[in-house]
Structures are given as C-alpha cells and as structure tokens.
Image: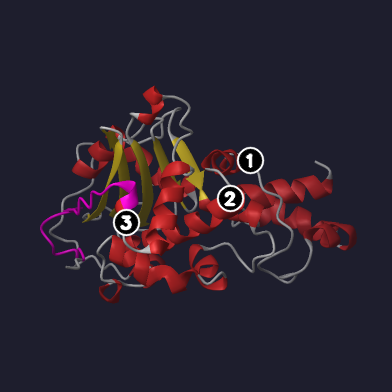
C-alpha cells in the first residue's frame, strides 16, 4: 500500500517497520543496496560492542520560505533506515517523516515556483519549534550511530539551527553536494536534480520508492520527500565510488577544487585557464558576486594565489 503526506494530512509519520534478516531481502537490487549501506555506509564495526549498537541512515531535506538567512522551514522530510542487532540478526526498519508547517514570513515567489507550496496550503499547520516531534526525533538521532545525509548540508543545518537542531560533534554528516564535487568533477552541474538525471539515477526511482512505499506520481518534482528519494540514490552511487562512508564524511568537510565554471560568460570553461587570461574577472566575482559558495571561493582564491 502506497502513501503520501499532503499538507492536509493529519499525521507526519509512516512507521513502515519492514523488519527482516539481512538474508531475507527479496529483490536483488535492494539487497545489494541496503547490505552495502549497513556494512559500509553506517559505522565501521570493529568489535561486538559496536555491532550491538543502533545504526541509522537519515536522508533529510527542507523546503523554506526563501533561501536567505532567517527564512522559515515550511516542509521538513527525512527518510530513515534504522538497523538494530538483536540475537545476532540484523533487523531494519524503514520510515518516512514528512510534515508541513505554517510560515511566519511570506513565501517568496522564487521559492514558491520551485516547491509549489502556497500560504493557503499551510495556513492551518503548526509553526515548527524546538518541541516539534520531528526536531525531537532528529535530536534523538544526533549521535555517532547516525549518518545524516543532505545535499548542501550547510544550508539545511543552518535552517534547522533556530529550531533547536544543530549537528553534535559526534554526528556523522555526509554532504552529497560537496562529495559530488570531489568525485564527479566533470559533471555539468552539481544540483541534486542535475546529478539525478545526468547519471541515470532516475532509472532506479521505482525500486527505492517501492521500498519506502512512496507513490511518486503524487509528488511535486521538488517535494522534500521526492528530493530525499533522489538523495538516497545519489548517496548509493557516491558510496560505490568512495568505497566507504568514512571517506564520504572526510570529503564532506574538505574544500573541493572546482574545475570549470557552471554559470556566467565563461560557463563550461576551465577556472584555471580563466585565471591566466582574465584574472580581473575572478577578482570581480570574489568582491561582487553573492552566489559564490565555499568551494568556488576556495578554488578562485587558490588560482589567484591567495
């Protein structure tokens, strides 16, 4: 039975509880996927004490009233794969948490045209707070037994911070945006949607949607649940390249060198090459362009010798 949470739904949780031994997964594609996530994608099992711990993957996305600092979260969704070892048998539960929240500030039209959430749709919803069930659940998982996977982690964790969730020092965070910059440097862009189509991940959407019992035909293309399904597929692909979750975690905190511009008059051209022929353009970007992220700033400064 499929489900989807519309803003007018009354419950935020689907406790799918698909528990089964590792050997009990039926479909080969899912068995290969989730065995890899558990054996390599969560924690390094070094002794029986570690093996007995809860191990959790959380794929998270938010939709907001705008992209600027101080914007409100109006949709918060996360997919959770939780594994527990009981009597030497690993059992997994799969769940989807999806909730809509009333806005405090107006939803910008730029944001609205992306996520298609209008103020009328969420007028009767609660306002997200530090006592909201989703924030309490994220804080329960805020430890070294969890890997939190986000595309552009800096943005989403920054948006969550005013609501009472900040990643602890022990939480393992994978930023697939930065990891993709490291591992897929020749991609035509690094947005989640671009990577999803460019690398053929859409071909596996039916399988992952079935596992989480999500009917994707009822979702907008930029819905937070849909984005998380795409995110899980991107994570799988990056994990196969990086070989371990620990490497992905390391790359997530390491600045990435960007090879070429993905915007502007030099779109598609080598940043190194532009530094040799038009250094003034790079300096102009540093001083005037508000769209530079940390990695592009790092790359430009590197080529300018700063």
Q: Of the residues under marks 1 and 3, which one precedes in the sequence? A: 3
Q: Quadrant of residue 88?
A: top left
Give the structural element (helix, strand or loop) at label 3.
loop
Work out whether 215 lies above or below 38: below
Mark 2 vs mark 1: which is more N-terminal?
A: 2
The quarter of the picture where residue 218 lies is bottom left
Mark 3 or 2, nearer chain start: 3
- Residue 225 seen in the current view: yes
Q: Nearer the viewer, mark 3 or mark 2?
A: 3
Q: Position of residue 294 (x, y in %)?
A: 62, 47
- The residue pinned by badge 2 equals 178
> Circle 1 sits on which residue?
254
Membership of 135 in magenta stretch: no
Q: Which residue is mark 3?
A: 25
Asked if residue 140 lies left or right of residue 230, the reply is left
Q: Circle 1 — which element?
A: loop
Front residue of 187/146: it is: 146
């Amino acid at each position: 039975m499929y489900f989807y949470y519309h803003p007018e739904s009354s419950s935020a949780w689907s406790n799918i509880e698909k528990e089964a031994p590792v050997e009990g997964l039926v479909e080969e594609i899912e068995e290969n996927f989730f065995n890899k996530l558990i054996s390599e994608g969560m924690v390094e099992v070094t002794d029986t004490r570690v093996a007995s711990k809860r191990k959790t993957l959380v794929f998270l996305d938010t939709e907001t009233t705008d992209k600027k600092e101080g914007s409100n979260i109006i949709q918060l969704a996360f997919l959770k794969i939780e594994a527990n070892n009981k009597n030497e048998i690993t059992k997994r539960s799969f769940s989807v948490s999806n909730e809509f929240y009333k806005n405090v500030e107006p939803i910008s039209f730029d944001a609205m045209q992306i996520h298609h959430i209008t103020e009328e749709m969420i007028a009767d919803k609660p306002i997200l707070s530090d006592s909201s069930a989703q924030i309490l659940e994220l804080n329960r998982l805020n430890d070294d037994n969890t890997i939190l996977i986000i595309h552009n982690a800096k943005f989403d964790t920054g948006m969550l911070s005013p609501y009472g969730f900040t990643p602890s020092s022990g939480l393992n965070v994978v930023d697939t945006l930065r990891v993709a910059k490291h591992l897929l440097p020749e991609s035509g862009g690094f947005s989640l949607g671009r990577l999803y189509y460019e690398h053929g991940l859409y071909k596996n959407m039916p399988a992952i949607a079935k596992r989480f019992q999500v009917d994707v035909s009822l979702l907008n293309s930029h819905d937070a649940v849909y984005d998380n399904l795409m995110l899980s597929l991107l994570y799988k692909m990056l994990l196969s390249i990086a070989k371990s979750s620990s490497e992905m975690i390391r790359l997530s905190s390491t600045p990435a060198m960007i090879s070429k511009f993905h915007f502007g008059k030099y779109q598609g051209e080598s940043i190194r090459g532009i530094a040799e022929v038009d250094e003034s353009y790079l300096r102009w970007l540093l001083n005037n362009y508000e769209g530079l992220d940390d990695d592009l700033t790092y790359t430009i400064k590197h080529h300018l010798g700063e």
